[in-house]
Amino acid sequence: MAMAVEGAGAGVVVSEPEVVSIPPTPRGMSTPEGTATPPPAAGRGAATPARRVVEGLRGYLEEVGHLTRLNPQDAWLPITESRSGNARYAAFHTLNAGLGFQALLLPLAFPALGWSWGIISLTVAYFWQLYTLWILVKLHEAVPGRRYNRYVELAQAAFGEKLGMWLSLFPTIYLSAGSATALILVGGETMKLFYQIVCGPICSPSPISTIEWYLVFTSLAIVLSQLPNLNSIAGVSLIGGTTAITYCTMSWVLSVSQPRPPTVSYEPQAYTSLGSSLFSTLNALGIIAFAFRGHNLALEIQATMPSTFKHPAHVPMWRGAKVPQGGMLTALYAFHSHDIPRGLLAATFLLVVFNCLSSFQIYSMPVFDSFEAAYTGRTNRPCSVWVRSGFRVFYGFLSLFISVALPFLSSLAGLLGGLTLPVTFAYPCFMWICIKKPERFSSGWYLNWGLGLLGTAFSLALCVGGVWSIISSGMKFKFFKPPS
Protein backbone atom coordinates (compact mmCIF):
# COMPACT_ATOMS: atom_id res chain seq x y z
CA MET A 1 0.00 0.00 0.00
CA ALA A 2 1.34 3.41 -0.90
CA MET A 3 0.54 6.94 0.18
CA ALA A 4 0.84 9.84 -2.28
CA VAL A 5 2.38 13.02 -0.96
CA GLU A 6 2.25 16.17 -3.04
CA GLY A 7 5.62 17.85 -3.23
CA ALA A 8 6.64 21.11 -4.80
CA GLY A 9 6.11 20.46 -8.45
CA ALA A 10 6.26 16.66 -8.24
CA GLY A 11 4.44 13.78 -6.60
CA VAL A 12 6.44 11.85 -4.04
CA VAL A 13 5.35 8.34 -3.09
CA VAL A 14 6.24 7.22 0.42
CA SER A 15 5.67 3.61 1.47
CA GLU A 16 3.46 3.39 4.53
CA PRO A 17 5.03 1.11 7.13
CA GLU A 18 2.92 -1.90 8.04
CA VAL A 19 2.07 -2.34 11.70
CA VAL A 20 2.90 -5.89 12.70
CA SER A 21 2.36 -7.65 15.99
CA ILE A 22 5.40 -7.49 18.22
CA PRO A 23 6.73 -10.88 19.35
CA PRO A 24 7.23 -11.56 23.06
CA THR A 25 10.14 -9.83 24.70
CA PRO A 26 13.12 -12.18 24.87
CA ARG A 27 14.89 -13.50 27.95
CA GLY A 28 16.86 -10.74 29.60
CA MET A 29 15.55 -7.95 27.38
CA SER A 30 12.92 -5.28 27.98
CA THR A 31 11.42 -2.05 26.85
CA PRO A 32 13.38 0.99 27.98
CA GLU A 33 11.52 2.85 30.68
CA GLY A 34 11.17 6.58 30.86
CA THR A 35 12.58 7.29 27.39
CA ALA A 36 10.72 9.78 25.28
CA THR A 37 10.92 10.44 21.57
CA PRO A 38 13.02 13.59 20.98
CA PRO A 39 11.16 16.46 19.37
CA PRO A 40 11.79 17.03 15.69
CA ALA A 41 14.80 19.19 15.00
CA ALA A 42 14.19 22.62 13.63
CA GLY A 43 15.07 23.28 10.01
CA ARG A 44 16.23 21.02 7.18
CA GLY A 45 12.97 19.24 6.47
CA ALA A 46 11.74 18.94 10.03
CA ALA A 47 8.18 19.47 8.83
CA THR A 48 8.31 17.33 5.67
CA PRO A 49 5.55 14.74 5.25
CA ALA A 50 8.06 11.89 5.24
CA ARG A 51 9.54 13.07 8.54
CA ARG A 52 6.05 13.38 10.03
CA VAL A 53 5.27 9.80 9.01
CA VAL A 54 8.45 8.51 10.63
CA GLU A 55 7.88 10.54 13.78
CA GLY A 56 4.29 9.29 14.02
CA LEU A 57 5.41 5.70 13.57
CA ARG A 58 8.02 6.06 16.30
CA GLY A 59 5.43 7.52 18.66
CA TYR A 60 3.12 4.62 17.91
CA LEU A 61 5.87 2.09 18.65
CA GLU A 62 6.62 3.85 21.93
CA GLU A 63 2.99 3.53 22.94
CA VAL A 64 2.21 -0.05 21.93
CA GLY A 65 5.42 -1.79 20.99
CA HIS A 66 8.80 -2.97 22.18
CA LEU A 67 12.01 -1.54 20.76
CA THR A 68 14.26 -4.41 21.81
CA ARG A 69 16.35 -7.07 20.16
CA LEU A 70 14.17 -10.18 20.11
CA ASN A 71 15.19 -13.67 21.16
CA PRO A 72 12.81 -16.24 19.70
CA GLN A 73 13.61 -18.74 22.47
CA ASP A 74 11.56 -16.72 24.95
CA ALA A 75 8.44 -17.35 22.86
CA TRP A 76 8.99 -21.10 23.41
CA LEU A 77 9.27 -21.14 27.21
CA PRO A 78 6.29 -21.55 29.57
CA ILE A 79 6.97 -18.42 31.63
CA THR A 80 7.38 -15.98 28.72
CA GLU A 81 5.36 -17.84 26.08
CA SER A 82 2.27 -15.72 26.70
CA ARG A 83 2.42 -11.97 27.39
CA SER A 84 -1.31 -11.45 27.96
CA GLY A 85 -1.15 -11.19 31.75
CA ASN A 86 -2.81 -8.41 33.72
CA ALA A 87 -3.34 -7.19 37.28
CA ARG A 88 -6.01 -9.82 37.98
CA TYR A 89 -3.74 -12.65 36.90
CA ALA A 90 -0.95 -11.21 39.04
CA ALA A 91 -3.28 -11.13 42.05
CA PHE A 92 -4.34 -14.75 41.48
CA HIS A 93 -0.77 -16.01 41.10
CA THR A 94 0.63 -13.99 44.00
CA LEU A 95 -2.17 -15.07 46.33
CA ASN A 96 -1.75 -18.71 45.34
CA ALA A 97 2.02 -18.61 45.83
CA GLY A 98 2.04 -16.53 49.00
CA LEU A 99 -0.81 -18.07 50.99
CA GLY A 100 -0.99 -21.83 51.30
CA PHE A 101 0.00 -24.82 53.36
CA GLN A 102 2.81 -22.88 55.07
CA ALA A 103 0.15 -20.84 56.90
CA LEU A 104 -0.92 -24.06 58.63
CA LEU A 105 2.45 -24.18 60.37
CA LEU A 106 2.13 -20.72 61.96
CA PRO A 107 0.47 -22.02 65.18
CA LEU A 108 3.73 -23.88 65.89
CA ALA A 109 5.47 -20.50 66.31
CA PHE A 110 3.14 -19.12 68.99
CA PRO A 111 4.05 -21.42 71.94
CA ALA A 112 7.57 -19.94 71.92
CA LEU A 113 6.65 -16.33 71.06
CA GLY A 114 3.36 -15.95 72.91
CA TRP A 115 0.33 -14.10 71.58
CA SER A 116 1.70 -10.54 71.75
CA TRP A 117 5.15 -11.13 70.27
CA GLY A 118 3.75 -13.61 67.79
CA ILE A 119 1.32 -11.05 66.38
CA ILE A 120 4.00 -8.32 66.38
CA SER A 121 6.43 -10.61 64.53
CA LEU A 122 3.81 -11.49 61.94
CA THR A 123 2.96 -7.81 61.38
CA VAL A 124 6.58 -6.72 61.00
CA ALA A 125 7.35 -9.62 58.67
CA TYR A 126 4.30 -8.79 56.53
CA PHE A 127 5.27 -5.16 55.93
CA TRP A 128 8.93 -6.08 55.44
CA GLN A 129 8.14 -8.62 52.74
CA LEU A 130 5.64 -6.22 51.15
CA TYR A 131 8.45 -3.66 50.76
CA THR A 132 10.86 -6.18 49.24
CA LEU A 133 8.13 -7.35 46.88
CA TRP A 134 7.73 -3.75 45.70
CA ILE A 135 11.50 -3.64 45.10
CA LEU A 136 11.39 -6.75 42.91
CA VAL A 137 8.45 -5.39 40.91
CA LYS A 138 10.33 -2.13 40.23
CA LEU A 139 13.62 -3.87 39.39
CA HIS A 140 12.00 -6.06 36.73
CA GLU A 141 12.59 -3.24 34.23
CA ALA A 142 15.17 -1.21 36.12
CA VAL A 143 17.70 -1.07 33.28
CA PRO A 144 16.58 0.46 29.96
CA GLY A 145 16.43 -2.20 27.28
CA ARG A 146 16.19 -5.18 29.65
CA ARG A 147 13.52 -7.23 31.39
CA TYR A 148 14.70 -9.52 34.17
CA ASN A 149 12.19 -12.33 33.82
CA ARG A 150 13.62 -14.64 36.48
CA TYR A 151 14.95 -14.17 40.00
CA VAL A 152 18.34 -15.68 39.18
CA GLU A 153 18.75 -13.30 36.22
CA LEU A 154 18.16 -10.28 38.46
CA ALA A 155 20.58 -11.64 41.08
CA GLN A 156 23.26 -12.06 38.41
CA ALA A 157 22.68 -8.52 37.14
CA ALA A 158 23.00 -7.13 40.67
CA PHE A 159 25.80 -9.24 42.15
CA GLY A 160 27.66 -10.51 39.09
CA GLU A 161 27.35 -13.74 37.10
CA LYS A 162 29.07 -16.13 39.52
CA LEU A 163 28.15 -14.56 42.86
CA GLY A 164 24.54 -14.00 41.80
CA MET A 165 24.21 -17.62 40.72
CA TRP A 166 25.83 -18.88 43.92
CA LEU A 167 23.63 -16.76 46.20
CA SER A 168 20.28 -17.32 44.52
CA LEU A 169 20.36 -20.75 42.89
CA PHE A 170 19.92 -23.00 45.94
CA PRO A 171 17.18 -20.95 47.67
CA THR A 172 15.15 -20.58 44.47
CA ILE A 173 15.55 -24.28 43.61
CA TYR A 174 14.34 -25.25 47.05
CA LEU A 175 11.47 -22.75 46.98
CA SER A 176 10.29 -24.28 43.69
CA ALA A 177 11.23 -27.97 43.78
CA GLY A 178 11.24 -28.26 47.58
CA SER A 179 7.82 -26.67 47.80
CA ALA A 180 6.47 -29.18 45.27
CA THR A 181 7.80 -32.01 47.43
CA ALA A 182 6.28 -30.53 50.59
CA LEU A 183 2.96 -30.06 48.79
CA ILE A 184 2.90 -33.78 47.95
CA LEU A 185 3.47 -34.58 51.64
CA VAL A 186 0.77 -32.21 52.87
CA GLY A 187 -1.67 -32.97 50.05
CA GLY A 188 -1.31 -36.74 50.32
CA GLU A 189 -1.70 -36.80 54.10
CA THR A 190 -4.69 -34.45 53.91
CA MET A 191 -6.35 -36.70 51.33
CA LYS A 192 -5.87 -39.55 53.78
CA LEU A 193 -7.56 -37.56 56.57
CA PHE A 194 -10.40 -36.65 54.21
CA TYR A 195 -10.86 -40.32 53.31
CA GLN A 196 -10.92 -41.35 56.98
CA ILE A 197 -13.56 -38.75 57.83
CA VAL A 198 -15.82 -39.48 54.88
CA CYS A 199 -15.47 -43.25 55.05
CA GLY A 200 -15.44 -43.55 58.84
CA PRO A 201 -15.02 -46.90 60.58
CA ILE A 202 -16.12 -48.82 57.49
CA CYS A 203 -12.71 -48.34 55.82
CA SER A 204 -10.55 -48.99 58.88
CA PRO A 205 -9.91 -52.74 58.31
CA SER A 206 -8.01 -52.14 55.04
CA PRO A 207 -6.79 -48.52 54.97
CA ILE A 208 -4.93 -47.13 51.99
CA SER A 209 -1.27 -46.49 52.82
CA THR A 210 0.23 -43.01 52.95
CA ILE A 211 2.50 -43.74 49.99
CA GLU A 212 -0.53 -44.66 47.92
CA TRP A 213 -2.13 -41.33 48.82
CA TYR A 214 1.06 -39.57 47.74
CA LEU A 215 0.76 -41.38 44.42
CA VAL A 216 -2.87 -40.34 43.99
CA PHE A 217 -2.05 -36.70 44.72
CA THR A 218 0.96 -36.73 42.37
CA SER A 219 -1.09 -38.23 39.54
CA LEU A 220 -3.70 -35.48 39.86
CA ALA A 221 -0.96 -32.82 39.98
CA ILE A 222 0.66 -34.21 36.82
CA VAL A 223 -2.65 -34.08 34.95
CA LEU A 224 -3.08 -30.41 35.91
CA SER A 225 0.53 -29.64 34.99
CA GLN A 226 -0.21 -30.25 31.31
CA LEU A 227 -1.52 -26.68 31.05
CA PRO A 228 1.09 -25.08 28.78
CA ASN A 229 2.23 -21.82 30.38
CA LEU A 230 2.00 -19.53 33.38
CA ASN A 231 -0.89 -17.47 32.03
CA SER A 232 -2.90 -20.61 31.30
CA ILE A 233 -2.99 -21.55 35.00
CA ALA A 234 -4.50 -18.22 36.13
CA GLY A 235 -7.82 -19.97 36.79
CA VAL A 236 -6.04 -22.67 38.77
CA SER A 237 -4.29 -19.98 40.83
CA LEU A 238 -7.64 -18.31 41.49
CA ILE A 239 -8.99 -21.59 42.86
CA GLY A 240 -5.83 -22.06 44.93
CA GLY A 241 -5.97 -18.59 46.46
CA THR A 242 -9.69 -18.81 47.18
CA THR A 243 -9.44 -22.23 48.82
CA ALA A 244 -6.46 -21.09 50.92
CA ILE A 245 -8.39 -18.13 52.33
CA THR A 246 -11.43 -20.34 52.95
CA TYR A 247 -9.73 -23.23 54.73
CA CYS A 248 -7.51 -20.96 56.83
CA THR A 249 -10.61 -19.10 57.99
CA MET A 250 -12.54 -22.32 58.60
CA SER A 251 -9.65 -23.84 60.56
CA TRP A 252 -9.41 -21.09 63.13
CA VAL A 253 -13.16 -20.45 63.29
CA LEU A 254 -13.91 -24.14 63.90
CA SER A 255 -11.18 -24.32 66.55
CA VAL A 256 -12.24 -21.14 68.38
CA SER A 257 -15.92 -22.10 68.28
CA GLN A 258 -15.22 -25.22 70.37
CA PRO A 259 -14.21 -25.28 74.05
CA ARG A 260 -10.52 -25.70 74.77
CA PRO A 261 -9.60 -29.34 75.40
CA PRO A 262 -8.42 -29.91 78.99
CA THR A 263 -5.00 -31.15 77.87
CA VAL A 264 -4.28 -28.03 75.77
CA SER A 265 -2.86 -24.75 77.12
CA TYR A 266 -2.85 -21.39 75.38
CA GLU A 267 -0.08 -20.01 77.60
CA PRO A 268 3.46 -19.51 76.24
CA GLN A 269 5.70 -22.48 76.72
CA ALA A 270 7.99 -22.40 79.77
CA TYR A 271 11.70 -23.17 79.32
CA THR A 272 14.25 -24.35 81.82
CA SER A 273 17.14 -22.21 80.55
CA LEU A 274 17.85 -18.98 78.72
CA GLY A 275 19.49 -20.89 75.86
CA SER A 276 16.42 -23.05 75.32
CA SER A 277 14.18 -20.00 75.28
CA LEU A 278 16.45 -18.14 72.84
CA PHE A 279 16.79 -20.98 70.34
CA SER A 280 13.08 -21.80 70.50
CA THR A 281 12.30 -18.17 69.74
CA LEU A 282 14.66 -18.20 66.77
CA ASN A 283 13.06 -21.40 65.47
CA ALA A 284 9.62 -19.79 65.83
CA LEU A 285 10.77 -16.74 63.85
CA GLY A 286 12.06 -19.14 61.19
CA ILE A 287 8.59 -20.66 60.90
CA ILE A 288 7.13 -17.17 60.42
CA ALA A 289 9.74 -16.43 57.74
CA PHE A 290 8.87 -19.74 56.07
CA ALA A 291 5.23 -18.62 55.86
CA PHE A 292 6.10 -15.56 53.72
CA ARG A 293 7.22 -17.00 50.43
CA GLY A 294 6.52 -16.49 46.76
CA HIS A 295 9.05 -13.70 46.11
CA ASN A 296 11.03 -16.12 43.96
CA LEU A 297 8.04 -16.13 41.59
CA ALA A 298 7.39 -12.36 41.45
CA LEU A 299 9.58 -11.67 38.40
CA GLU A 300 8.25 -14.75 36.60
CA ILE A 301 4.66 -13.56 37.12
CA GLN A 302 5.54 -10.06 35.91
CA ALA A 303 7.22 -11.56 32.83
CA THR A 304 3.81 -12.72 31.59
CA MET A 305 2.64 -9.11 31.15
CA PRO A 306 3.07 -6.86 28.14
CA SER A 307 5.24 -3.82 28.73
CA THR A 308 5.50 -0.60 26.77
CA PHE A 309 7.10 2.80 27.26
CA LYS A 310 3.86 4.37 28.41
CA HIS A 311 2.42 1.27 30.11
CA PRO A 312 5.25 -0.56 31.90
CA ALA A 313 4.52 -3.96 33.40
CA HIS A 314 5.32 -2.92 36.97
CA VAL A 315 2.06 -0.91 37.24
CA PRO A 316 -0.44 -3.79 36.86
CA MET A 317 1.95 -6.17 38.65
CA TRP A 318 2.05 -4.03 41.77
CA ARG A 319 -1.72 -3.52 41.68
CA GLY A 320 -2.18 -7.26 41.63
CA ALA A 321 0.59 -8.10 44.11
CA LYS A 322 -0.89 -5.84 46.81
CA VAL A 323 -4.08 -7.96 46.98
CA PRO A 324 -2.82 -11.04 48.78
CA GLN A 325 -0.62 -10.43 51.09
CA GLY A 326 0.75 -29.44 58.90
CA GLY A 327 0.42 -28.79 62.34
CA MET A 328 -2.89 -26.98 62.31
CA LEU A 329 -4.83 -29.60 60.38
CA THR A 330 -3.50 -32.45 62.49
CA ALA A 331 -4.50 -30.63 65.68
CA LEU A 332 -7.94 -29.86 64.27
CA TYR A 333 -8.47 -33.54 63.49
CA ALA A 334 -6.99 -34.81 66.76
CA PHE A 335 -8.79 -32.50 69.18
CA HIS A 336 -12.06 -31.61 67.42
CA SER A 337 -12.93 -34.57 65.18
CA HIS A 338 -15.69 -35.53 67.64
CA ASP A 339 -16.96 -31.97 68.28
CA ILE A 340 -17.23 -30.61 64.76
CA PRO A 341 -19.64 -32.06 62.14
CA ARG A 342 -17.90 -34.48 59.83
CA GLY A 343 -19.13 -32.57 56.80
CA LEU A 344 -17.34 -29.36 57.86
CA LEU A 345 -14.12 -31.19 58.67
CA ALA A 346 -14.24 -33.04 55.36
CA ALA A 347 -14.87 -29.77 53.47
CA THR A 348 -11.89 -28.12 55.19
CA PHE A 349 -9.55 -30.96 54.26
CA LEU A 350 -10.87 -31.06 50.70
CA LEU A 351 -10.14 -27.35 50.29
CA VAL A 352 -6.57 -27.98 51.48
CA VAL A 353 -6.18 -30.66 48.80
CA PHE A 354 -7.44 -28.27 46.10
CA ASN A 355 -5.04 -25.58 47.30
CA CYS A 356 -2.06 -27.96 47.31
CA LEU A 357 -2.86 -29.09 43.76
CA SER A 358 -3.06 -25.46 42.63
CA SER A 359 0.11 -24.39 44.42
CA PHE A 360 2.00 -27.33 42.92
CA GLN A 361 1.44 -25.83 39.47
CA ILE A 362 2.80 -22.35 40.12
CA TYR A 363 5.78 -23.52 42.17
CA SER A 364 6.68 -26.09 39.51
CA MET A 365 6.47 -23.67 36.57
CA PRO A 366 10.04 -22.30 37.03
CA VAL A 367 11.34 -25.89 36.98
CA PHE A 368 9.40 -26.64 33.79
CA ASP A 369 10.83 -23.43 32.34
CA SER A 370 14.39 -24.54 33.18
CA PHE A 371 13.88 -27.96 31.60
CA GLU A 372 12.53 -26.46 28.40
CA ALA A 373 15.20 -23.73 28.29
CA ALA A 374 17.90 -26.41 28.35
CA TYR A 375 16.11 -28.38 25.61
CA THR A 376 15.47 -25.42 23.31
CA GLY A 377 18.99 -24.13 23.85
CA ARG A 378 20.42 -27.42 22.59
CA THR A 379 17.98 -28.09 19.75
CA ASN A 380 17.11 -24.51 18.71
CA ARG A 381 13.45 -25.44 18.38
CA PRO A 382 10.43 -25.39 20.68
CA CYS A 383 9.42 -28.41 22.73
CA SER A 384 6.82 -30.62 21.13
CA VAL A 385 3.71 -31.53 23.11
CA TRP A 386 5.17 -34.94 23.91
CA VAL A 387 8.52 -33.57 25.08
CA ARG A 388 6.83 -30.95 27.27
CA SER A 389 4.49 -33.56 28.71
CA GLY A 390 7.41 -35.93 29.31
CA PHE A 391 9.32 -33.29 31.28
CA ARG A 392 6.34 -32.69 33.55
CA VAL A 393 5.60 -36.34 34.15
CA PHE A 394 9.27 -36.94 34.99
CA TYR A 395 9.34 -34.00 37.40
CA GLY A 396 6.13 -35.08 39.11
CA PHE A 397 7.36 -38.58 39.83
CA LEU A 398 10.80 -37.29 40.83
CA SER A 399 9.06 -35.11 43.44
CA LEU A 400 7.08 -38.17 44.55
CA PHE A 401 10.31 -40.13 45.01
CA ILE A 402 11.80 -37.34 47.13
CA SER A 403 8.60 -37.19 49.20
CA VAL A 404 8.84 -40.88 49.99
CA ALA A 405 12.59 -40.68 50.63
CA LEU A 406 12.37 -37.55 52.85
CA PRO A 407 9.00 -37.71 54.65
CA PHE A 408 10.31 -35.46 57.45
CA LEU A 409 10.85 -32.49 55.11
CA SER A 410 7.87 -30.47 56.37
CA SER A 411 9.19 -30.80 59.95
CA LEU A 412 12.22 -28.71 59.02
CA ALA A 413 10.20 -25.51 58.53
CA GLY A 414 12.31 -23.44 60.94
CA LEU A 415 15.63 -24.44 59.38
CA LEU A 416 14.37 -24.11 55.81
CA GLY A 417 12.81 -20.76 56.64
CA GLY A 418 16.23 -19.52 57.74
CA LEU A 419 17.97 -20.85 54.63
CA THR A 420 15.52 -19.24 52.22
CA LEU A 421 14.88 -16.05 54.20
CA PRO A 422 17.38 -13.90 52.19
CA VAL A 423 15.36 -14.43 48.99
CA THR A 424 12.44 -12.59 50.58
CA PHE A 425 13.93 -10.26 53.18
CA ALA A 426 17.58 -9.52 52.29
CA TYR A 427 18.59 -9.97 48.65
CA PRO A 428 16.02 -7.52 47.20
CA CYS A 429 17.43 -4.72 49.37
CA PHE A 430 20.98 -5.40 48.20
CA MET A 431 19.76 -5.65 44.59
CA TRP A 432 18.21 -2.19 44.87
CA ILE A 433 21.49 -0.75 46.12
CA CYS A 434 23.56 -2.43 43.38
CA ILE A 435 21.25 -1.55 40.48
CA LYS A 436 19.60 1.72 41.49
CA LYS A 437 22.68 3.04 43.34
CA PRO A 438 20.92 5.43 45.76
CA GLU A 439 22.90 8.38 47.05
CA ARG A 440 25.25 7.39 49.86
CA PHE A 441 23.97 8.14 53.36
CA SER A 442 20.50 8.99 52.05
CA SER A 443 17.40 7.60 53.75
CA GLY A 444 16.94 4.96 51.03
CA TRP A 445 20.59 3.96 51.31
CA TYR A 446 20.34 3.49 55.07
CA LEU A 447 16.99 1.69 54.83
CA ASN A 448 18.10 -0.91 52.30
CA TRP A 449 21.50 -1.52 53.90
CA GLY A 450 19.83 -1.86 57.30
CA LEU A 451 17.11 -4.26 56.15
CA GLY A 452 19.54 -6.27 54.01
CA LEU A 453 22.07 -6.74 56.82
CA LEU A 454 19.31 -7.44 59.35
CA GLY A 455 17.80 -10.04 57.05
CA THR A 456 21.17 -11.72 56.58
CA ALA A 457 21.78 -11.79 60.34
CA PHE A 458 18.32 -13.22 60.92
CA SER A 459 18.98 -15.90 58.32
CA LEU A 460 22.10 -17.10 60.13
CA ALA A 461 20.43 -16.93 63.55
CA LEU A 462 17.32 -18.78 62.37
CA CYS A 463 19.42 -21.54 60.83
CA VAL A 464 21.14 -22.00 64.20
CA GLY A 465 17.75 -22.03 65.94
CA GLY A 466 16.38 -24.56 63.46
CA VAL A 467 19.33 -26.91 63.98
CA TRP A 468 19.00 -26.59 67.76
CA SER A 469 15.28 -27.39 67.55
CA ILE A 470 16.02 -30.55 65.56
CA ILE A 471 18.63 -31.68 68.08
CA SER A 472 16.65 -30.81 71.21
CA SER A 473 13.46 -32.48 69.99
CA GLY A 474 15.34 -35.68 69.22
CA MET A 475 13.98 -35.77 65.68
CA LYS A 476 14.93 -38.97 63.90
CA PHE A 477 15.41 -38.80 60.18
CA LYS A 478 13.68 -41.89 58.88
CA PHE A 479 14.38 -42.16 55.18
CA PHE A 480 11.86 -44.00 53.02
CA LYS A 481 9.55 -44.43 56.04
CA PRO A 482 6.53 -42.13 55.64
CA PRO A 483 3.87 -42.30 58.35
CA SER A 484 1.52 -45.24 57.91
Image: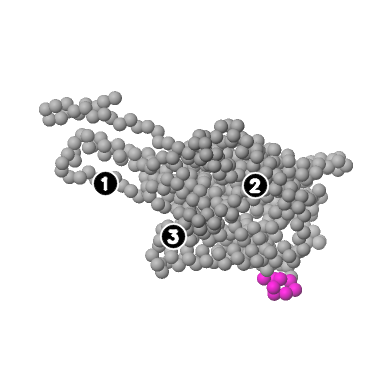
Give the Cα separation between the discs numbered 2 and 3.
32 Å
Residue in the foreground of this view, choosing between 341 and 388: 388
| Secondary structure at numbered mark 1 | loop
Instruction: Report how far apart the C-alphas of labels 3 and 1 lie in the structure.
Output: 29 Å
Residue 210, image x, y percentages: 78, 45
Q: Is residue 269 magenta?
A: no
Residue ID at (71%, 41%): 217
Which of the two discs, 3 and 1, sits closer to the camera?
3
Q: In the rendered structure, which segment of residues is drawn in magenta? A: 271-278
Q: Is residue 387 left or right of residue 203?
A: left
Name the residue beneath numbered marker 2.
180
Residue position for label 3: 434
Label 2 Cα neighbours within 10 Å, binned few <14 / some 14-19 / many ≥20: many
Q: Secondary structure at mark 3?
A: helix
User: Percent from the top left, x then y, of residue 313?
Assistant: 44, 46
**Can residue 217 be seen from the camera position used here?**
yes
For badge 1, the amino acid type reads Pro
Q: Is residue 276 magenta?
A: yes
Separation of disc 1 and disc 2 at Cα?
A: 50 Å
Instruction: Give the mark, 2 or 3, whose residue is nearer the N terminus.
Output: 2
* Mark linked to residue 304: none
Residue type indicated by callout 2: Ala
Q: Earlier in the sequence, mark 1 or mark 2?
A: 1
